Amino acid sequence: MDFRRRFLHRSFNKIYILLLFFSGVLSAESTKNTFKITAPDIAAVLPSVENTLLESYQKIGVDAEIVRLPTIRSLATANNSDWVDAELVRSAELAQNLIDYIMIPIPILSLSMRSYGNNVNQCFSTWESIKSSKVAFLRGFISIKSRLIKHNIEFLEVETNEQALAMLQAHRVDVIIISEKLLPETVRSRLENNKNHCMKELEVIELYHFIRKRHQAIVPQLTQAIKESFTGKVIN
């Protein structure tokens, strides 16, 4: 009887260990198979965009998750890390930087890039009008940076929009360039209620989702799903 009890006890232990092993394997495999989508951390202020994109993936049977990183690091990671499957949103001109990616040709976000001058009489409605000014903008916005370089405009890259606003108020720069949609509500309210600055729209930039070429088999389905999910939802 003791021998049988010991035998059953050992058998139970072996089965338990095997179950733990296979449970870990399945869990790891599940994590491995989850689509990893990198995104600039500032995208956290637009949860509806992230959620709608994840819903688009779910429509075609793909589990996906957003991995937020600093804006410039997000792009570098997307380019240099094999674990990345897609990049949340970038402008069409960034396609030349994301050479291993396919751009889904449906805009999922539309950003109004606006200039905020130091005072009500200092307004900038075009890129050319900023030429003699010192500009600050959020680091990692390559579309803005390329336009400033093109027009030979002096600029400073900052880590947060709050820092850019503080520099404007301290007269360390003449103008800041930001999109209100990417501002925390508290900062947006401060700008809207401040009558000492002149705000003008410079340009509207449309952003697109990028997916790695190794997943090109699902691109037609994903394109259709994104079209259905985002129709009428492009944020202006």
Image: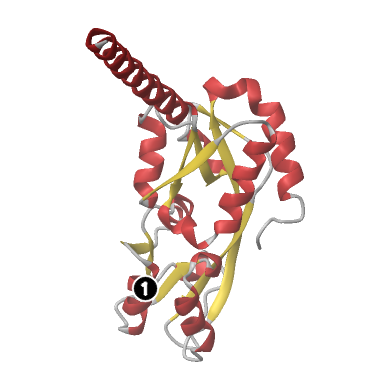
Image coordinates of residue 13 in percent, x first then y, are: 29, 18
- Position of residue 85 in the picture relative to residue 205 (left or right): left
Q: Residue at x 64, y 37 (%)?
A: 58
- Regarding residue 21, the answer to whether it shows in the image is yes
The amino acid type of the residue labelled 1 equals Glu
Image coordinates of residue 119 in percent, x first then y, are: 45, 87
Question: Residue at label 1?
Answer: 162
For this rendering, which residue is in front, 21 or 91?
21
Q: Residue at x 35, y 51 (%)?
A: 70
* Quadrant of the rendering where the N terminus is positioned: top left
- Regarding residue 205, the answer to whether it shows in the image is no
For this rendering, which residue is in front, 56 or 117?
56
Image coordinates of residue 94 in percent, x first then y, are: 50, 41
Q: Quadrant of residue 171?
A: bottom left
Q: Secondary structure at mark 1?
A: helix
- Position of residue 34 in the picture relative to residue 4 (left or right): right
- Position of residue 225 in the picture relative to residue 3 (left or right): right
- Position of residue 92 in the picture relative to residue 68 (left or right): right
For this rendering, which residue is in front, 21 or 172?
21
204 vs 222: above or below: below
Q: Residue at x 56, y 50 (%)?
A: 50
